[in-house]
Image (spheres, rainbow, N blue to C red):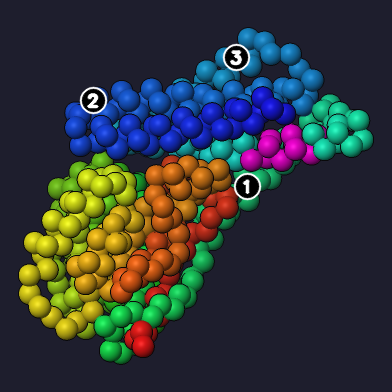
Amino acid sequence: MEALWKKCFFCLYLWREFCILRARFTLKKSFLMQMIWFLFFSFVAFGGLASLTVLRISSWWGRRIGRIQRGLIVLLALMVPLAMWVARAFQGIVAEMLAKAGLFLLGFLTVSFNVILVFELLNFVSKTIFHTDMRGIVWGSLLIIALIGTTGFAMRSARAIKVKTVEIPVTNLTKESTILYLSDIHISHTSDLPFLKKIIAQLNALEGEFVVINGDFIDGKGFSEADLQLLNSINKDVYLTLGNHEAYAGNAYVKQLLKNTKIRLLEDEVLHAHGWELIGLADMAGFDTAENHELLDQKLATLLTNTTTLPKLLILHEPIGPQVAEQHGINLQLAGHTHYGQIFPFTLAVKIAFPYIKGLYRFGTNALFVSSGIWTWGPTMRLGSRSELVVLKLIPKG
């Protein structure tokens, strides 16, 4: 039992170190160097998950660790990071299928971590209280059934969009306002277009003055301009900021795709619309660090040069620097990016990188709202989080 806990925390530690190193190398190294670091740390981290899954399943079935198990561990550990790389670097049906297979394995391994942990805890209680070891063919079979069932539940949860209404009192707001808010759509292939149509249908059915899409809208190069013309069927004004995943696809490519749509891109600019001063910032590619606080301070000082009585709405993909935003008179700050960890225990790992990962936070006259995202990154699974489309009911703060 103690060995299992050590493996669990070791995987989280590796993920934390990977996040820190990724942030450092994003701005300072070439794309090739980023990929080398990404693949190396992904192999180590996911190799740990693969080892945990294969070794514990074998243990519950009473099987010795042989060449087949060792080969399976290596295959799983390599498949996941290579699939992520393929998803970024190549196009076409074969690349898409390979990427989806690898990303499914990533989700399966992460879900397996949770299921195996529950079974190990049950076995620990059984041995401690009843002096009975549960491991064997019967409980080993139940473990496999639980793995399959929980994976299916996680896949279903990702596709079940929750329309959530959140009421937020906003300083400097003189009348009630309703905004439809979503982030992290992460469409990457034409096979994602039916899901995008589903989102558009929900947006058109809801009451709201305008729509905000806060980054990570496009996550691949599998589209043409014609594919995204369906965005013109949205019956409200739409404002979009770029996230870190648009940068992976290529910001110029994304802008070209959106050129003939009704989407209004806000990239380090201010726009007065619908009774708001909208401040849309380009992605800042990092975490809630002192360096990004300084960068945010510089951007807001440059952009907010005109005095206005309108309430200020800051749209920034990452939940960065709400205290800094408050000093510049921001009344409402919208963020996404975290996915609320998407699959537990990554919730804990994300919490290390970002102190604000979901919901409403207040900082003086500034209210920060972080969405868990409407879709997923990597595996199409959620466990311990929800896909959400948020109806923001904004009321004057007395």
Whether residue 260 is situated above or below residue 392 in the rendered picture: above
Q: CA distance from mark 3 to mark 2?
A: 30 Å
Specify the quadrant of the image occupied by residue 272. bottom left
Nearer to us: label 1 or label 3: 3
Quick check: can you spot residue 225?
A: no
Q: Which residue is mark 3?
A: 70
Q: Quadrant of the C terminus?
A: bottom left
Q: Is residue 391 left or right of residue 382?
A: left
Name the element at disc 1.
helix
Disc number for residue 32 = 2
Disc number for residue 61 = none
Identify residue type, mark 3. Answer: Arg
Q: Residue at x 90, y 30 (%)?
A: 132
Where is residue 395? Give x, y as percent.
37, 85
Q: Residue at x 20, y 63 (%)?
A: 280
Q: Earlier in the sequence, mark 1 or mark 2?
A: 2
Q: Which residue is mark 1?
A: 152
Name the element at disc 3.
helix
Where is residue 290? Give x, y as percent.
25, 47
Q: Quadrant of the N terminus?
A: top right
How packed is label 1: few (under 14 Cα within 10 Å), some, or many (20 or more)? few
Q: CA distance from mark 1 to mark 2?
A: 36 Å
Identify residue type, mark 2. Answer: Leu
Front residue (pair 202, 229): 202
- The segment highlighted magenta reads 114-123
